Every structure is written in C-alpha cells, then in structure tokens.
Amino acid sequence: MVEFSPEVIDTIITAAALLGAGFAMIAGIGPGIGQGYAAGKAVESVARQPEARGNIITTMLLGQAVAESTGIYSLVIAIVLIFTIAV
Amino acid sequence: MMDPGPQVVTYLFGNEMLPITDTLIWAWVVCIALIIIAWAATKNMQEVPTGLQNGAEFFVTAILDQIEPMIPGHGRRLLPFIGTIFAFIGLSNLVGFIPAVQNPTADLNTTLGLGLVVFLISHYEGMKENGVLGYIKGFAEPVFILFPLNVVSELAKPISHSFRLFGNMVGGGIIITLIYQAAPWVMPVPLHAWFDLFVGAVQALIFGMIAIAYIAVARDN
C-alpha cells in the first residue's frame, strides 16, 4: 500500500474535479443537436407558411429552451466541480 | 482566484444572519429603475400616446398577446404578475451590459426565488380552476400508479426553470470574464452584445413564456 502525502492527495482531488468538469460538458452535444433540429424544422415551417412566422418562432424558442435544460444541468455540475471542489 | 458568486457587501443591522449581497443591491436598483420608468410613463397619460407611454403600451399589449392564446379570458388578471416577471428579468439581464455591474439573475437565490413564486402561483391557479381535490386527483391520471412520478416531475419544474436562467447568465459571465483576462481590448464588446443583450432578452422572454405555460398546464390539469 502506497502512502500519499496530503499535498499529493489535494492535487489528485483538484485534477479529478477539473477532469470531471470537462467530461460533464460532453452533455453539451445533446442540446446542440436538439436545438439545431428545432431551428431547422422551424425554417421549414416558415418556408411553407410565412404568415405563421411569429407563432413558429415563439414555439421554437420554447422548445429550444426546454431542450437546453440538460446542457444547463451539466454546466451547473461543471461550475460546482470547478469552483467548490477544485479551488 | 476570486471567490465566485455573490459577494457580501454589508450586514443588515449588523446581524451576521442577514447579509446584504451585491446581487441584492443591484436587484433593488433594478426595482427602483422600473418604478421610476412606470411612473414617468403613466404620470401624464394622453389619448394618443407619445414617447415613453407608447413604449409602455407596446410592452403591455405584447405580453397580453402572449398570455391570451395560452390562457384564454384571463390575460388581464395575470398581466401584472407575468408583466412583472418580464420587466424585472429583462432589465436584470440587460444591466450586466454596464461594466462592474453584477447581474441579479446570475445568482441562484434570485432565480430560484422567482421559480418558486411561479410554482406557487401555478398550483394556486390549478386548485382555483379545478378545486383542491379535483386538482390532486389530476396527478393520478391516466393510471393511479403514476401519482408519485407526476409529483416528482411537478417538483422538478421550478428547479429546471430557475437553473435555466441561472446557467445561461452565469455561463455568459464566465466566458466574458475569461475573455477579459485573455484579450481585454475590443474582443469583449461583441461578446457583451451577444450574452447580455441578445441572450438576456431571449432568456427573459423564455422565462416568462414558460411561466405562462406552467400556469396553463396547471389550469388544464
């Protein structure tokens, strides 16, 4: 069994927290795809029915905001890891 | 590294349990600014609106047009609540454009407070529309086994609602802070325009729209 000094343990904890913050932000891929899909469909809808533009944009923004939740959760986890554990 | 999050400026009555943070001070500044704008817009109302009164009327009709399709017939009653959310969050997001100003909405205390207010109002509206027992019975739809699941999804609403605004404002603030350290000239200007003006306006719209949607869903049960 290898004994580590407290400084080494602190360094390992900081490194692991920073790595974890980076890995948490992989979740940014999902909202990116989801929001892009919603925007693409909204463009198609506006091209088909230009008179319903206002309603389509409001609905698109609402859907994108809901799709964004998972990305925001991962951002919050990354912020917690960086600012409360790593520092 | 500087301590992140809201900074304690002073203590109310010197009591350690009542800290006054910079977030709170800027929230008060935003409230006072809104009161002054509302007073100036309505002190000398004309039949044919001009200037500030024109802008205020445009704001009110724009919000009424958002509420009426979702909750028909109750737009005027819900207007003060929804309009306050739009105005307060909108101005709170925009004041970050001024250097050295802390966005009141970049603090989880503010956004969670607003989210909980929307949560309470939506349940009050649902109970008023369907009756207390009828509203609680609505959680057992379509099968009774789904009751705990529906309750959990209901409790997740204020959390996701408040974390969305908080995450967007803090994320933009962190990116701007990093850019200030790397390239303090010119570069922050377009980023301020994007994160404070565009994202701030869109997030205020989204927070208000989702508040309307939650109230409408609770009323329909």
Image (cartoon, grey):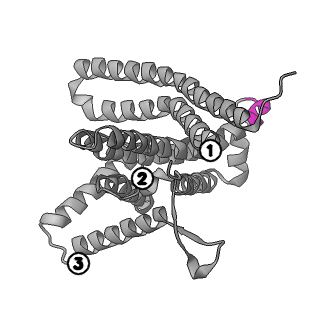
Residue A75 coordinates in the image, percent (x, y): 52, 34
Q: Residue at x 32, y 53 (%)?
A: B94
Q: Is the magenta stretch mostly helix, strand or loop?
A: helix
Q: Residue at x 48, y 20 (%)?
A: A29
| Alpha-carbon span between mark 1 and mark 3 | 49 Å
Pointer 3: what residue?
Answer: B43
Rendered position, B38 above or below B114: below
Q: Residue B124 carries which label?
A: none
The secondary element bearing badge 2 is classed as loop
Residue B219 coordinates in the image, percent (x, y): 56, 47
Whether the residues at callouts 3 and 2 have beta carbons within 8 Å, the answer is no
Asked if one can make out residue B73 in the rendered structure from this viewpoint, the answer is yes
Residues shaded magenta: B143-149
Q: Please, which residue is most extreme toward the bottom here?
A: B13
Q: Which one is nearer the viewer's eye here, B11 or B157?
A: B11
- Circle nearer the viewer, 1 or 3: 1
User: How many residues crowd around disc 3 within 10 Å: few (fewer than 14), some, or many (20 or more)?
Assistant: few
User: How many residues crowd around disc 2 within 10 Å: few (fewer than 14), some, or many (20 or more)?
Assistant: few
| Alpha-carbon span between mark 3 and mark 2 | 29 Å
Q: Mark 1 lies on which chain?
A: A
The secondary element bearing badge 1 is classed as helix
- The amino acid marked with disc number 1 is Thr
Q: Which mark is residue A84?
A: 1
Q: Please, which residue is most extreme toward the right here?
A: A1
Q: Which one is nearer the viewer's eye here, B198 or B82?
A: B198
**Residue A54 occupies quadrant:** top left
Indicate the quadrant containing the C terminus of chain B: top left, top right, bottom left or bottom right. Answer: top right
